[in-house]
């Protein structure tokens, strides 16, 4: 999320009761996720395993639970519990606003756009021109839909990220301050779920087409002109590059990248990042060509055993 | 789709700017999909690989992108881009009509049928007697529901087919002019999606029962007295014959046939047509008995290796 | 289900035209499922394979299709078709009541609970304090939601159980008289389906978190502080104990138990009960450690074959 205005390090430190390392008037523009962070942003880190990644990222400010040495040009916000402080920032800048009606007065809807009955459109939603929003679609606050977008019945755009931290007393939820961006010429099937980002935006880029019952996790970016078939689940913080095809019931781990033009065959489970331009199959997903050779070899071996 | 009245070859040729091969007054009654096409129908074909199949089908008229020799008794409509011309026909005869209210005035609802709150029922929908349509169900235009049908909450009946052609500038959508037919005594769970046909009808036959979150693709026919468990995805243009059982999370390729009485065990992936009366398992799905023997043999081999 | 008041064996026998074995005034408090049955309850059994299980259960009364010897302290209701008689009891005590509005007058909604637009809340639903019920959620009659519960858009709570008996004339539905209980601090994602119990309650215990598009079958009990990722399907009559984690697209057979603290990796298929505290993978799911060893051994073998 971007703050409504730029704040200083001192202001944010006071807000979350942090020890600031850096110039008092160091400017901060928002919070973000590590895989898409930009200068001006805060990222948070609470596990030593990820300290280096956060400190070497493009983030200007690292919200951290140890007083480490501050990289040049950056600032630190040192607190006991960065997770809770990140939630404080979300609550302060982007708390949940209950709706007073089905289509918020603050929503902006473009020309020639059709909104069918029983649709929910939250606060500050922007929808472009020439869209069709079919019945019972739900678009949560602050989501942004481009031009020439079709969204079929019952789809949910912008529900909270599924992101929890285990505490001795139970799971603690990381609040979502991010949003969903649907670019031009995207088609979305019926009963899909596209979660908002924790602090970045979940994005579906231009020309991509989703079938029914597709799940896209928080902060994930789906490239241009991708095809995603029914019952696919793309986890959070993934990057799916342009021209990727995911066939039915494919699932992915979180945080992985599927490079440009890769094709993942049905029911495959993508456990790590995959190179582009190839076809993959299986769980864990491997190159389809090799997988098929292995299966053929194994079957030959089993037949040979029989003969002996 | 059937046209509102029978048209002549000449009329349709003029509508889509095609070169007609055949008698000017050759009668055409509608458009259809190749796996269910009937005399009087147009089918379209734009790839040489499928020319023969289209020309030898029961279609009376073939919309094609090459001037081939016309089979006796049939007619041709020759155009540069049959896909686009098929869309022109759909736009002309069955363009999307936005709703003015949640339950269209043109909808017909039978006796003793209960419609719960927040349901959407589109133009020209017909629902039979003794049905229960639970809250937030969406029934798109022109769908037809039989008698004694139960549809649970949030299910979408009749969203568009997921059918795109790759163009240099991005994916081009094939418009849907078909519908969905739900026969008598069908039960459909919550949050299912049953897409309309591209030009034929997606059909769920008498007595079949669907669990929650089931996806049925466009133009697919599900036979009588089938059981389909949760999170199953049946792709487009499939034929599932009577008495088939698909257990949870099964997926299928498009265009395949599963014959009468087959049982597909959970999470299997059906990649090609399957004979009836047998039980299948795995991805790609094979006869469960053989699959289990293979696994047993492999495990024995692994144990033997250990001993050496 | 519990009856509105305690009935006698004689009363119930007359209601369903059964031959009663036991004292006329033997008290009966309701109907229940065998895996959670309590004294005072009726269970039904119609297959000799399960007679012993039913007769030795905690049920006070067994509705059965054979005059067996009655265990001491229990009673029998002997009928030709226990399934149909069980349905008669449900129809008598808990028949479906159509809604007259989106939020029933008999629903009770706690303090500081936010109900977003287009939500359906059925008869006698109870929702606690500090909950957020997002748009287009459907909560069927008699379901009970605790305090501090969040339910995201379009989720269905309390649709009927998917439970059918094959008859020569088609599938016969077992009617659902049970309910759904969601305990405190549970979060449920968008477009989930949690079915009501057939005669018991489907229960999600305190602190458990569900991602989007999760399916929980009838009469299943999910323990405390579980994490269930997207597109998971837990079948009916399962027991998932506390602190279990089910990753994306996991599926289970019905009637199994997953013990405390087990972790099931993505896309696994759980075909039988699993011990707690371990990590599982594959279909059928086995211990992940062993599965990975097997795969490694197999790959080594295939490489060795290549060298020869």
Image (cartoon, coloured by chain):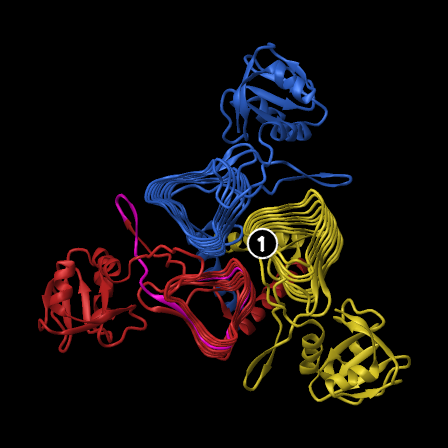
Chain colours: A blue, B red, C yellow
Foreground pick, A93 / C5: C5
Q: Is residue B173 magenta?
A: yes
Indicate the position of residue C97 as horizontal and vertical percent values: 63, 68
Is residue A70 in sight in this rendering?
Answer: no
Query: In what quadrant of the picture does the N terminus of chain C appear?
Result: bottom right
Taking B232 as reference, is A245 above or below it? above
Looking at the image, residue B46 lies above or below residue C175 = above
Q: Quadrant of residue C123?
A: bottom right
Q: Secondary structure at mark 1?
A: loop
Report the side of A207 relative to C23 (left or right).
left
Quarter-wise, where is residue B47 in the image? bottom left
Q: Dot 1 corresponds to which residue? A: C155
Q: Is residue B78 above or below residue C18?
A: above
- Start-end of magenta stretch: B167-194
Q: Tell me if A196 is positioned left or right of A181 in this view.
A: right
Is residue B216 at least partly visible in the picture? Answer: yes
Q: Nearer the viewer, residue B37 or C194?
A: C194
Label 1 neighbour load within 10 Å: few <14, some 14-19, many 20+: many
| Residue found at the far right of this picture | C72
């Amino acid at each position: 999320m971007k703050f409504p205005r730029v704040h200083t390090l001192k202001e944010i430190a006071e807000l979350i009761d942090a020890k600031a390392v850096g110039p008092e008037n160091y400017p901060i523009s928002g919070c973000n996720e590590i895989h898409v962070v930009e200068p001006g942003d805060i990222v948070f880190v609470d596990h030593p395993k990820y300290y280096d990644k956060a400190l070497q990222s493009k983030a200007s400010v690292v919200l951290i639970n140890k007083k480490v040495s501050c990289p040049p040009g950056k600032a630190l916000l040192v607190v006991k519990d960065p997770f809770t402080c990140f939630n404080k920032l979300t609550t302060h800048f982007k708390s949940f606003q209950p709706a007073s009606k089905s289509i918020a007065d603050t929503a902006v809807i473009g020309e020639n756009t059709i909104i069918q009955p029983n649709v929910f459109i939250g606060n500050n939603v922007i929808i472009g021109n020439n869209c069709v929003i079919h019945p019972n679609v739900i678009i949560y606050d602050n989501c942004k839909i481009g031009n020439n977008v079709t969204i079929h019945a019952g789809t949910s755009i912008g529900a909270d990220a599924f992101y929890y931290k285990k505490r001795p007393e139970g799971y603690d939820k990381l609040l979502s301050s991010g949003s969903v961006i649907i670019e031009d010429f995207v088609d979305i099937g019926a009963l899909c779920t596209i979660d908002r980002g924790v602090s970045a935006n979940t994005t579906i880029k231009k020309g991509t087409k989703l079938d029914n019952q597709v799940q896209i996790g928080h902060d994930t970016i789906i490239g241009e002109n991708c095809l995603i078939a029914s019952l696919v689940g793309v986890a959070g913080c993934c990057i799916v590059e342009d021209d990727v095809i995911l066939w039915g019931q494919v699932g992915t781990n979180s945080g992985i990248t599927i490079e440009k033009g890769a094709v993942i065959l049905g029911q495959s489970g993508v456990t790590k990042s995959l190179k582009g331009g190839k076809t993959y199959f299986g769980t864990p997903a491997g190159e389809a060509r090799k997988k098929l050779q292995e299966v053929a070899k194994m079957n030959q071996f089993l037949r040979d055993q029989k003969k002996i």
